[in-house]
């Protein structure tokens, strides 16, 4: 079974996808996965709607957003198989001795993520939960994460929002330390497979095999550890030193970021939807049952 799979973008927290491919776990399920680049985050979905791609990985945010803006069609997006079940972003600041609280952001210049919408939407909800209006914060200009890290090193920003490997790079360079981990809030449905309903109807057996392959990642990681994981996926990150990649993998594994399971968490879906709606990114959040494939739904009440 040949499947054209589009990666959302190259990111360290997508390691389970790359590992499953590199370890031959897809092949063991009878799959020939053709991994294709995505020119920009989310653009693979447009190619999927044209029939050029069978499935993508990315945030269920895309599914919720589509339900808010488009009428029902065979191109309705559906999510299945949760891989990243928690938020992979961190706040990094210069070394300090005082304990950090989100309330401190009222008095600091913050560099937020501009490449994709989800991390800032989720952080805004964390701030609201802490009684802080996100709109009163002093945010730096819209820049990439590497640019924000450089600005932090120059003293132009007080705190920056980053994911790995930039966190490990900041620590290794003595530029900053983790002062807040977004995964501490708990479940947030961050990354799944996404397909159109038409593609699911066409490739249902292949998608079932993809789920079975991904579910083999967690037992493998438990048996082999994060240093071996870094070695396995190193070819996907040729510009990263092994020490940085291994540090990043260890940080994410310690955070229990990866669930790699068939079912998409109801609690994680609800948290993501709340973050999107309260920030005005969507007007309403479609029901879980409309956005998640029936065979990938968590049993209600669990």
Image (cartoon, rainbow, N blue to C red):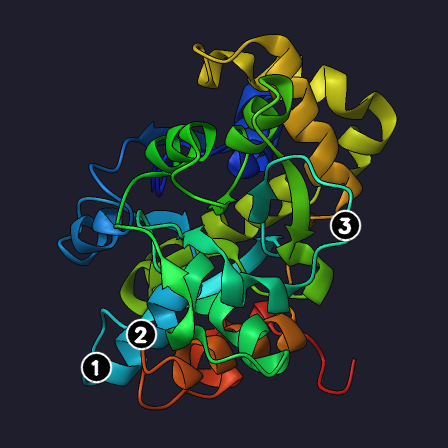
Q: Secondary structure at mark 1?
A: helix
How dense is the environment of label 3, judged by Cα within 10 Å: few (below 14), some, or many (20 and up)?
A: few
Image quarter (top left, top right, bottom left or bottom right) of the C terminus: bottom right
Image quarter (top left, top right, bottom left or bottom right) of the N terminus: top left
Task: Check residue 89 in the rendering and tell me which mark sits there, or answer none.
Answer: none
Q: Is residue 44 above or below residue 7?
A: below
Q: Give the left or right position of residue 219, taking residue 185 as reference.
A: right
CB atoms of marks 1 and 3 within 8 Å: no
* Residue tagged 3: 98
Badge 1 or badge 3: first in the primary sequence:
1
CB atoms of marks 3 and 2 within 8 Å: no
* Residue tagged 1: 69
x 42%, y 43%: residue: 157
Relative depth, front residue between 3 and 49: 49
Measured Cα–Cα span from mark 3 to mark 2: 39 Å
Q: Is residue 217 visible?
A: no
x 67%, y 29%: residue: 249
Q: Secondary structure at mark 3?
A: loop
Q: Is residue 144 above or below residue 159?
A: above
Q: Give the left or right position of residue 182, taking residue 68 as reference.
A: right
How dense is the environment of label 2, judged by Cα within 10 Å: few (below 14), some, or many (20 and up)?
A: many
* Residue tagged 2: 65
CB atoms of marks 1 and 2 within 8 Å: yes
x 82%, y 21%: residue: 224
Q: Quadrant of residue 23?
A: top right
x 50%, y 55%: residue: 192
The x and y percentages for residue 211 are 59, 49
Relative depth, front residue between 155 and 152: 155
Q: Secondary structure at mark 2?
A: helix
């Amino acid at each position: 079974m040949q499947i054209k799979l589009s990666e959302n973008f190259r990111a360290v927290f997508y390691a389970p996808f790359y590992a499953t491919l590199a370890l031959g776990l897809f092949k063991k399920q009878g799959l020939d996965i053709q991994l294709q680049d995505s020119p920009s985050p989310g653009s693979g979905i447009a190619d999927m709607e044209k029939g050029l791609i069978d499935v993508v990985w990315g945030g269920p945010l895309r599914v919720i957003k589509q339900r808010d803006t488009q009428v029902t069609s065979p191109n309705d997006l559906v999510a299945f198989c949760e891989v990243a079940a928690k938020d992979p972003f961190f706040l990094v600041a210069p070394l300090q001795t005082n304990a950090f609280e989100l309330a401190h952001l009222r008095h600091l210049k913050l560099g937020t993520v501009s490449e994709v919408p989800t991390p800032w939407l989720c952080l805004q909800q964390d701030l609201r939960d802490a009684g802080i209006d996100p709109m009163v914060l002093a945010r730096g200009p819209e820049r990439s994460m590497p640019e924000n890290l450089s600005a932090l090193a120059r003293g132009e920003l007080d705190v920056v929002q980053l994911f790995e490997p930039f966190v490990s790079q900041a620590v290794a360079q003595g530029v900053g330390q983790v002062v807040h981990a977004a995964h501490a809030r708990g479940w947030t449905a961050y990354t799944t497979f996404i397909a159109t309903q038409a593609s699911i109807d066409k490739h249902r057996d292949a998608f079932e095999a993809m789920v079975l392959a991904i579910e083999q990642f967690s037992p493998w990681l438990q048996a082999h550890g994060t240093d071996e994981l870094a070695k396995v996926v190193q070819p996907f990150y040729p510009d990263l030193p092994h020490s940085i990649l291994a540090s990043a993998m260890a940080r994410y594994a310690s955070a229990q970021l990866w669930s790699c399971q068939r079912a998409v968490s109801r609690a994680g879906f609800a948290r993501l939807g709340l973050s999107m709606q309260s920030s005005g990114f969507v007007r309403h959040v479609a029901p879980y049952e409309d956005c998640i494939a029936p065979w990938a739904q968590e049993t209600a009440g669990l």
